[in-house]
Image: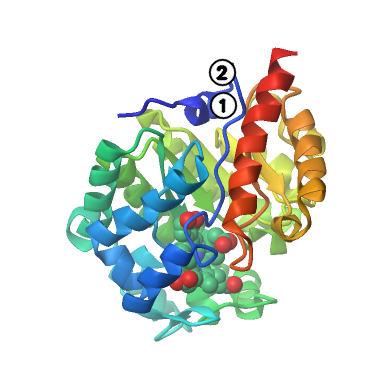
Amino acid sequence: MIENDLFLRACRRESVSRIPVWYMRQAGRYQPDYRDVRKRYSLIEICENPEICVQVTLSPVKQLGVDAAILFSDIMVPIAPMGMPFEIQKDRGPVMEHPIRQASDIERLRPIDPESDLPYVLETIRILARELKVPLLGFAGGPFTLASYMIEGGPSRDYLRTKAMMYGEPKMWYGLMDRLGDMVITYLRAQIQAGASAVQIFDSWVGSLAPDDYAEYVLPTMERIFSELADLHAPRIYFGVTTGELLPLFAKAGADVYGVDWRVPIRTARGKLGRNVAIQGNLDPAVLLAPWPEIQRRAESIIDMGIEQPGFVFNLGHGVFPSVSGEQLQRLTTFVHEYSERALRG
Ligand code: 1CP
């Protein structure tokens, strides 16, 4: 049962007594508890075991006092049941067994049925929704970002094969976007129906595209995804890295909340997105490695801009680094709460 709904109120641009905060990758290797669990289980084993997955998801909520939980999983989890097995390699990331190389590789992709293909995800969400006193965020990868792993075969810097398909084989590209769009819609609907109060689409790498290319090759799929989720009334968050120039187009995608990284000031992001959406972000995660006064100074500046209008959620601009101290993160959480409460009282 949700007792603290600040996060949902901020997503809906309602008034709040203080600014809600959560962190991307709030469950992860910066936590000694998480490192312990990872000695015994692989990342995928954690995701497939509801009891452990619940424990890993809850741990940062208890330790940090954040206002939202995020399902512990990975954006690649629903890709395997589509017919693309992968492994998560240490210090590298997801690596596909058979990357997409030709049209038949795309035609072979299957639609997912979350209840039979990913029952452990839905079971984890059902347990969390009962246990949590803060809202639970479900999530999926953005079709561009997922396609980049499926086509490149693993993490990439330049997305050359991905862009070669986009520019050179548009029929194949749109076929892949359609299948990934269907998957994201089906998967996020199932997560909300199982008890997730909000959903975030991690389109982490879409900022590698020029605005015209984003508009042509990705935006139509994003518009379809967000409109097909509208009837469930769970806030829809859209996040990407280096998206400053894409934000006016992001605004057309139809999400309720936009996550931005530290390269774009909150005030600038609002100017580009318009007044009808909420903003989430955007402390540079590297700042957490600086001494406390520096962290505080930068957090203050973000909060000062954030509270200029209703609809602000404090977060980092990307995920927590493994070398960050949990104590700093806890101190930051308390600081955001106390400072924003004073500032909002005026
Ligand atoms: O066990 C480990 O520590 C391995 C590292 C790790 C972790 C902790 C991976 C491999 N995935 C995860 C969990 C994860 N992945 C979460 C946890 C929930 C939370 O935030 O607390 C989330 C939200 C993700 C989503 C994810 N996976 C994204 C989008 C967010 C982002 O960081 O941009 C991406 C791009 C991935 C792919 C992926 N999985 C793992 C790694 C190392 C990567 C990135 C590889 C690359 O750089 O391309």
Q: Which residue is mark 2?
A: 14
Image location (x, y in percent) of residue 330? 58, 46
Residue 197 vs residue 153, the one in the foreground: 197
- Quadrant of the rendered structure where residue 315 is? top right
Q: Residues within 10 Å of mark 2 (few under 14, many from 20)?
A: some
Image location (x, y in percent) of residue 240? 63, 53
The residue at the far top in this view is: 346
Q: Is residue 238 left or right of residue 35?
A: right
Relative vertical location of residue 180 with respect to residue 300 in this rendering, above or below: below
Whether residue 177 can be seen here = no
Q: Amino acid at mark 1?
A: Ala
Image location (x, y in percent) of residue 276? 64, 24
Q: Secondary structure at mark 2?
A: loop
Q: Is residue 201 left or right of residue 119?
A: right
- Quadrant of the rendered structure where residue 214 is? bottom right
Query: Residue at point 30% right, 53% down?
Result: 54
Q: Is residue 247 left or right of residue 148?
A: right
Residue 14 vs residue 324, the one in the foreground: 324
**Is label 1's Cβ within 8 Å of ligand 1?**
no
**Is label 2's Cβ within 8 Å of ligand 1?**
no
Image location (x, y in percent) of residue 335? 67, 36
Whether residue 102 can be seen here = yes
Name the image quarter holding the C terminus.
top right
Relative vertical location of residue 200 with respect to residue 77 in this rendering, above or below: above
Residue 10 is tagged as 1
Q: Residues within 10 Å of mark 1 (few under 14, many from 20)?
A: many
Query: Residue at point 65% right, 72% down?
Result: 163
Query: Residue at point 41% right, 35% down?
Result: 135
Residues at marks 2 and 1, CA–CA distance in whole angstroms: 6 Å
